[in-house]
Amino acid sequence: MNPSQRLFAASCLSIMVTAMIFSIRADILQPVAQQYHLSNALIGLTMSSVFWGFTLGIFVSGLIVDLIGMKPLHILSGLGYLVGIGMILLAPPASAEVEQLRDSMGTTILYWGFLLTGIAQGIVEGVTNPLVATLFRHDKRRMLNKLHAWWPGGLVVGGLVAWMLGRMGLGWEVRLASVAVPVVIYLWMILPLQYPPSERVSARIPTLHMLAEIRRPMFLLLFALMWLTAATELAPDQWFAKIMSDLLPTLGKNAILFLVYTAGLMFLLRQYAAGWLFHRMSPYAVLTGSAVLSFAGLAVLGVLDPHAQWAGWAAFAGATLFGVGKTFFWPTMLAVTTEQFPRGGAFLLNLVGGAGMLSVMVALPIVGGLMDKHDTQTALMQFSLLPAVLMIVFGGLWLSQRQRGGYAPQSLD
């Protein structure tokens, strides 16, 4: 492989690790809640620290990546994973019901350990997105989708690892500790590699000009829309094992396989369909279709009758619609940002990515609270309002863009 291909391969493995830990967290969510005596709302708050950490990691990376370089930050992400996982594994269990996370030293350490793994995830995203945008500046949509194909790829790997270790009777601690193996591998891979300066630095765009891009109305709209697209995609995912086990109680520990299935769909579509799709369709058309399918999938799951004979098939259909619908949200939003605002460099790109994870931090405990207050299906129906709004907004952008002559990426060349 040439240097660009090696850097891309290392970036893909890093993204896979971030998703692997996401998938394993979804599987261990309930046993962790039981061991530390946490309600759905409190375990949701604990897991939301990951997304707050991600936001912090990606925002800070966007500000300093051009100053200190991509490689030191990439190495720091791996160290953050290892320390964060160690803190979680060493957190002492709570001895009684916990009303506030600060009531127990164990739940406090748990929160900060998950926060640190989230910071590591944010740094990975804060490095790999501008790196791929720089390496493939004339093919951003396709290559960012191929990079982020390894997010669902990592969900599949993590889900299968969690499922197999669970079937072997191993505890949640072993499942979480398994993430350390690929972290060490990607640290070993990146140590000898040389990283290029970012696209914005190569084009000698001053920092003040980069910061000025924030004020552009279209960027502000994309920034706001990322809150909705990321929450639609990722908030249900972190609860997906519980959602499917609530809808189909007979699944038991096999509920995680539904997350594996939808992640498999996403991997194949991002890896092999993105080039064909974006060659023929505007990114706004793709985002509109994504919103329609996501809404349909959540609605099917929300009206499902768990006691009906066809409940299994209905759950499969709803999961399929949702899995296909959420596929292109994240990488396409990043691609549109870097294609329309290349002068904004890594900072604007990471600002949008950070907004996505910040939205999930907010949405995750809300979903948990809705499931505490109502039932899982009512929570899903209420949450489906997000893609319903996206259908309208992206549809409007698509029509507006067609009236102006079509979508056209901007270039610094």
Image (cartoon, rainbow, N blue to C red):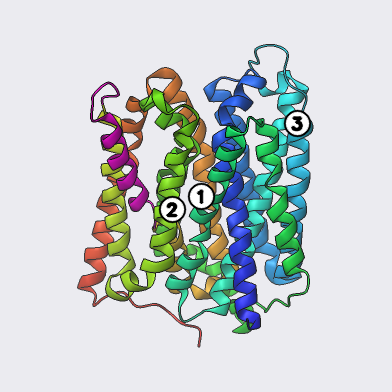
Compared across the picture, whether 250 is left or right of 190 comes to left
Please state, as top left, top right, bottom left or bottom right, where the N terminus lies in the image.
bottom right
Q: Report if residue 323 lies within the magenta region.
A: yes
SS category of the residue bearing label 2? helix
Q: Amino acid at mark 2?
A: Gly
- Residue farthest toward the top in the current orientation of the protein: 96
Which of these two is toward me, 381 or 17? 17
Q: Amino acid at mark 3?
A: Ile
Residue bearing the label numbered 2 = 264
Dot label at residue 156: 1
Distance from label 3 to label 2 (Cα)? 33 Å
Which of these two is toward me, 308 or 289? 308
Residue bearing the label numbered 3 = 109
Task: State which tag comes first along the sequence, 2 or 1.
Answer: 1
The location of residue 277, given as percent across then percent down, is 32, 69
For the point 61% across and 20% down, the residue is 34
SS category of the residue bearing label 3? helix
Task: State which tag comes first along the sequence, 3 or 2.
Answer: 3
Task: State which tag comes first along the sequence, 3 or 1.
Answer: 3
Location of residue 11 by image quarter: bottom right
Q: Is residue 360 above or below residue 275?
A: above
How packed is label 3: few (under 14 Cα within 10 Å), some, or many (20 or more)?
A: many
Which of these two is toward me, 70 or 258? 258
Compared across the picture, whether 75 is left or right of 317 comes to right
Distance from label 3 to label 1 (Cα)? 28 Å
- State which region is magenta: 305-327
The location of residue 219, given as percent across then percent down, is 44, 63
The location of residue 49, given as percent across then percent down, is 62, 38
Q: Is residue 314 above or below residue 203?
A: above
Report the number of numbered marks. Answer: 3
Do the numbered discs 2 and 1 sit on residues whose CB atoms are within 8 Å? yes
